């Protein structure tokens, strides 16, 4: 009896199913537009949760210390993350309907599937980070730095996703 392992694609698909409720898979082209919407809606919802966490953190900083460089930094992060959430919500679909001039081939869909998982993991890290507020002033710098890095990583992934869909990425 051969010890066959589950295919890497199956494990990736299972991870996507756990991360994005309603995910049905990019392979089934007739469902791609719907699953893409589900993925983007879930990413959007999670990004908005982080925005809300940051707004609460901002309120607590301003109410206790007034306007400070840290509060201004948090305010900029809120605007940046909210903008990324909206870009995610309105990002191009992974597949166009029949007779549309632009369609995505299966290789690109495989890359998008893996990319969606990376975006989901990054957003979950961001949610975890923003929901755990720093307990001391010394931790504020690390907290803000961690949030900034995750936002930059997500922004890079979102831009790469657009390049993959437009066929620019290799």
Image: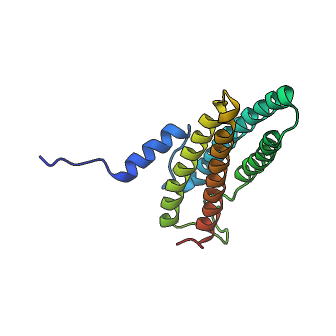
Q: Residue at x 51, y 54 (%)?
A: 113
139 with respect to 107 (left or right): right
Question: What residue do we see at 70% from left, 35% from top?
Answer: 49
Nearer the observer, 135 or 76 = 135
- The number of callouts visible is 0
Asked if 166 appears above or below 143 in the picture, the reply is: below
The colour scheme applied to this rendered structure is rainbow
Q: Position of residue 87 (x, y in %)?
A: 74, 53
Relative to residue 8, is residue 98 drawn left or right? right
- The single residue placed furthest to the front in the displayed view is 138
9 is higher (above) or lower (below) than 141: below
| Residue 157 percent across, percent down from the top left | 60, 57
Which residue: 52% across, 65% down?
Answer: 108
Outermost residue toward the right? 66
Left or right: 10 as drawn, with respect to 153: left
Q: Is residue 44 above or below residue 116?
A: above
Residue at screen point 18% across, 47% down: 3
Percent of width and height locating residue 79 = 81, 47
Residue 7's x, y, as percent? 33, 51
């Amino acid at each position: 009896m051969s010890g066959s392992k589950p295919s890497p694609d199956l494990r990736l698909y299972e991870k996507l199913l756990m991360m994005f409720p309603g995910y049905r898979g990019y392979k089934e082209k007739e469902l791609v537009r719907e699953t893409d919407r589900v993925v983007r809606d879930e990413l959007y919802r999670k990004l908005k949760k982080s925005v809300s966490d940051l707004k609460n953190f901002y309120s607590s900083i301003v109410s206790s210390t007034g306007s400070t460089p840290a509060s201004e930094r948090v305010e900029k992060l809120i605007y940046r993350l909210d903008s990324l959430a909206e870009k995610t919500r309105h990002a191009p679909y992974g597949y166009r309907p029949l007779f549309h001039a632009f369609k995505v081939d299966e290789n690109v869909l495989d890359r998008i599937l893996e990319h969606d998982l990376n975006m989901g993991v990054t957003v979950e890290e961001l949610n975890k980070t923003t929901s755990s507020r720093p307990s001391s002033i010394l931790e504020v710098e690390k907290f803000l730095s961690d949030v900034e890095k995750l936002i930059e990583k997500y922004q890079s992934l979102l831009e790469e996703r657009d390049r993959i869909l437009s066929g620019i990425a290799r």
